[in-house]
Every structure is written in structure tokens, then in C-alpha cells.
Amino acid sequence: MILHMENVSLKRDGSWILQNVNWDIKKGEHWVLFGLNGSGKTAILNMLNAFYFPSSGNLTVLDKEFGKTYLGEELRKKIGFVSSALQEKLHSNDNAFEIVLSGAFASIGLYERPTEEMREKAIDLLKQLGCYEYANRNYNTLSQGEKQRVLIGRALMGEPELLIFDEPTNGLDFIAREQLLETIQTIAVNSNSPTMIYVTHHIEEILPVFNKTLLLKRGEVFSSGNTKDMISSQQLSEFFDLKVTVFWQNGRPLLSK
Ligand SMILES: Nc1ncnc2c1ncn2[C@@H]1O[C@H](COP(=O)(O)OP(=O)(O)OP(=O)(O)O)[C@@H](O)[C@H]1O
């Protein structure tokens, strides 16, 4: 089991941020976590990474039950994370190659000596992700789209069991966004792809490979199941409390009022 959340609630500073969340993810599934601003998406991610503990309920991530063992670092090594928030934490003077390599140790910066095998793998990933040409450039000189690709390389370097994309297209123009989404789709359809969670509040970014969706509203699960059933005109009109229409084009949804 990749994830098992059973009646998970989270209270922070006196307010309930999540209430009775139930969510099961099996190995090989690819999920969208969809919610508006402030719905609790970040709170869920912070729990998966063992930064927050549930105030009540049962939580198991990658077969590890919270509360039974110390999880933090061991768990985070098996979870790849791609987000703009992570970009700010990285050492901006490291070059793209070093950032990818550091993924082998799940560290910010490179403190351990990488093996030759690791170096070769990092080069392969840079090539696969189209980052090879800027492998020697300092991270802080890369464009937002280039940075995100390097972060995907860093995440894959650790051979994660779960790969989480947290609003990865923030700050990307249309072309860069589509290129990044194409890369994600390519990784996801690969037979040895990690299980993936794609966190977003943009309907049109939902790729065909993410065929499961959880709709989160004000800290509660509004609904979850097959993406085609969740991302429908009827379901989303109820979700938004606003009449909307969903169109599907080339396996991707588009939303209009
Ligand atoms: N420490 C805290 N104390 C009180 N409230 C908090 C705390 N942390 C988060 N919240 C609140 O919990 C709610 C959920 O926040 P969260 O950041 O998880 O939302 P989100 O879905 O990730 O939003 P966004 O899409 O804007 O990033 C918000 O209303 C937020 O203000």
C-alpha cells in the first residue's frame, strides 16, 4: 500500500485543517489531488512527508504506520518531491548536475561522495529530461521550466516509490508548461514509473495518465474516484458551487463557466 488514510484529521493552532480524510493509493496508481486555495492540499503533503502527524485517525505511508515507528528521514528518502517551494531551499550555486546527484542522498547540497554509477545515472537522467545542455550551469541561472526539470531529475535519482508534483507548473509559460506536462506523462507511462500524485488547482493540467482524482474542499474529501467521474460538469458544479462545463479534448479536461 502506498497510502492509507483513514478518518485522518489535523488540527493546527486550534483550527481543524483536515477532517475525516479517507484516501487509499495502491502501487502504480496515478492520482490528482485537486482543491482550491486553502483546501488543505499542502497539509496533506506535509503529512505524507511526516512533517505533520494526524491529530486523529490512521495514516500509513509506504507500508509504515504513523505513530508506530520514527518515520521522517527514512520515509522522505522514498518520496520524490517536485515543487516550487523546494526550489527556494536548494543551494543556488550548485550546478544542475550536482542538484540531480544530490537526489541520491536526499540531501540539500552534496556532502557525500557520489559513486561513478551515481554520476552516470545523473547524466542519463539529465539527458532523458532534456537538461544535459545546461548540466554545468548554476541552478540560479536556469529558467523556471529548466529548474523544474532538474528537480524531476533530482527526485528520480533517489528511485522514489512515490513521486509528488506540487503545483509544478507555477510560473511557467504555456510552452514550458506543456513541455513539462509531456515529460511527466512520459515518466508516468513507463512501466517502472513510481506511483504519482499531482497536486493542482488547474483542471486543464490533468494528464490522461492521472486517472484517479481526489477532490478536496475545505479540509474534507468532497469526492474521490475515477478522474472521468470526478472531473465532470455535474460534479465540479457542485464542488465549486457554480455552474461550470467540462470539455474533454485529447484526453485532457477544459473548464468553462
Ligand atoms: N499552522 C496553521 N494554523 C492555522 N491554520 C493553518 C495553519 N496552517 C495552515 N492553515 C490553514 O489551513 C488551510 C489549509 O491550508 P493549506 O496550505 O493546506 O491549503 P492548500 O490547499 O495547500 O492551499 P494553496 O492551494 O493556496 O496552497 C488554510 O485555510 C490555511 O490558512
Image (tube, helix red, strand yellow):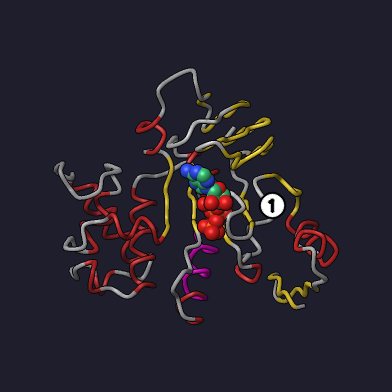
From the image, which quarter does the N terminus lie in? top right
- For mark 1, does the 10 Å Cα neighbourhood hold few (<14), some (14 to 19), or many (20 or more) residues? many
Magenta-colored stretch includes residue 116: no
Count of number-bearing discs: 1
Lateral position of residue 30 relative to residue 130, left or right: right
Residue that sits furthest to the right in the current view? 234
- Judge whether residue 101 can be spotted in this image: yes
* Residue drawn at point x = 30 percent, y = 59 percent: 88
Asked if residue 163 is positioned above or below residue 236 in the image, the reply reads above
* Residue drawn at point x = 49 percent, y = 56 percent: 165
Residues 237 and 59: in front is: 237
Image coordinates for residue 140, horizontal then vertical, percent? 23, 69
Lateral position of residue 247 relative to residue 168, left or right: right
Asked if residue 158 is positioned above or below residue 138 in the image, the reply reads above
Magenta-colored stretch includes residue 184: yes
Residue that sits furthest to the top in the current view? 68
- Judge whether residue 191 can be spotted in this image: no
Magenta extent: 178-189
Lateral position of residue 62 relative to residue 218, left or right: left
Q: Quadrant of residue 136?
A: bottom left
Residue assigned mark 1? 217
Q: Amino acid at mark 1?
A: Lys
